[in-house]
Amino acid sequence: MAKAKKLPSGSWRAQAYDYTDDSGKRHYKSFTAPTRKEAEFMAAEYQINKKKPAGEDITFGDALEHYITQRTPVLSPASIREYKRAVKNYNDIQKIKIREITQDIIQEHVNNFSMGHSSKSVRDNHALITAVLRIYRPDFALNTVLPQKRRPELYIPTDADIKKVIAAAEGTEMEVPILLAAFGPMRRGEICALRHEDISGNQVHVCRNMVMDEHGKYIIKQPKSYAGDRFIDYPDFVGAKLKGKSGNVTNLNPNMITQRFNHVLIQANVPHFRFHDLRHYGASILHALGMPDAYIMERGGWGNDGTLKNVYRHALEDQKKQLNDKVNKYFDTMQHKMQHENKKA
């Protein structure tokens, strides 16, 4: 343990070995404190932290790779795929040693990445940097200026849209996936992984999910989240489409559903929207019917109410003119009554 020495000022200084340079010269870190114990403690703490494995001497690129490898057994294949796909986005800082990274370096990286990427992508990019540094340099807190969050623009199909889409898909391989998404609501991967043994009458047990792994192959795994494992009771007309069959409900994969859905929209002659927006339609209808949020979240497999709030906000935008007219009519009526009462007085 490093021994502290008293300085002429009355403070105590302890030195801890840092590194040996190419010429063989040893370098030390100095720690000054009001007391001997404090100075020696600071030097000892530095030595302990310096000996931690995979510390600040590795590059950011190596730390990022190690971070992903450590989490591969526990994260979903889709998350691992996205992590590995994102590695190329850090080329400008990959060779910088963790201990040499500064706030300015990260800010410059974020500024450059912001050009040509959405605010969400920038925030996701920065979040991964933060996660890596939290492991390999825990005492370094970032205070990066990030682009403002933007409200996601959702398109919620109308009843008229849904009727046209169902009519266009009737009798095709897209009919059942559309019904399951709109009236469940179920996700693409959940529909593709659904088997007829998961269905009892009109009740569907959502207990699997089809996702693409890091090698670009579709695999079957557990649902997206704990909330994703759920039971959904469908209306009779949907249940009738699911009876008398075996094996997978559909032979399509998520990508095929997206491609074929685009063709259905063209045939139906409705505005373009995503297959996933069928889920938003289902949630908006449940909300309009007065269903509690807890029920809607459970039925749709949402772990939090973030998506629901966006759906409700969009639904409110559609009704805003009617609501504004109603509010202004009330105030106009109140004003007329006041004027009438003033005249009588």
Image (spheres, grey):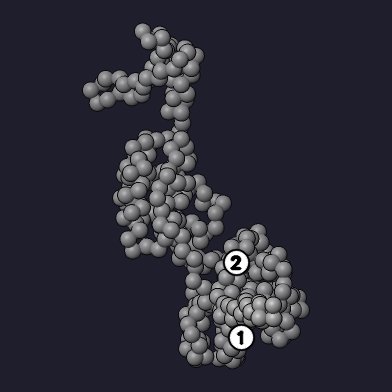
Residue 53 against residue 329 in the figure, above or below: above
Q: Where is residue 328 in the image (x, y as percent from the top left)?
A: 59, 78
Name the front one of labels 1 and 2: 2
User: Outermost residue, front direction?
Assistant: 345
Q: In which quarter of the image is residue 252?
A: bottom right
The Cα atoms of the two marked residues, 1 and 2, are separated by 20 Å
- Label 2: how many Cα within 10 Å (few below 14, some 14–19, many 20+): few
The numbered dot on residue 159 is 1
- Identified at 59% across, 81% down, the residue is 325
Q: Where is residue 299 in the image (x, y as percent from the top left)?
A: 69, 69
The numbered dot on residue 343 is none
Q: Is residue 58 left or right of residue 267?
A: left
Residue 215 against residue 284 in the figure, above or below: above
Q: Who comes first in sequence, dot 1 or dot 2?
A: 1
How many numbered markers are drawn? 2
- Identified at 68% across, 69% down, the residue is 296
Q: Quick one: quadrant of the C terminus? A: bottom right
The residue tagged with tag 2: helix, strand or loop? helix
The residue nearer to you, when weighing 322 against 178, is 322
The numbered dot on residue 309 is 2
The residue tagged with tag 1: helix, strand or loop? helix
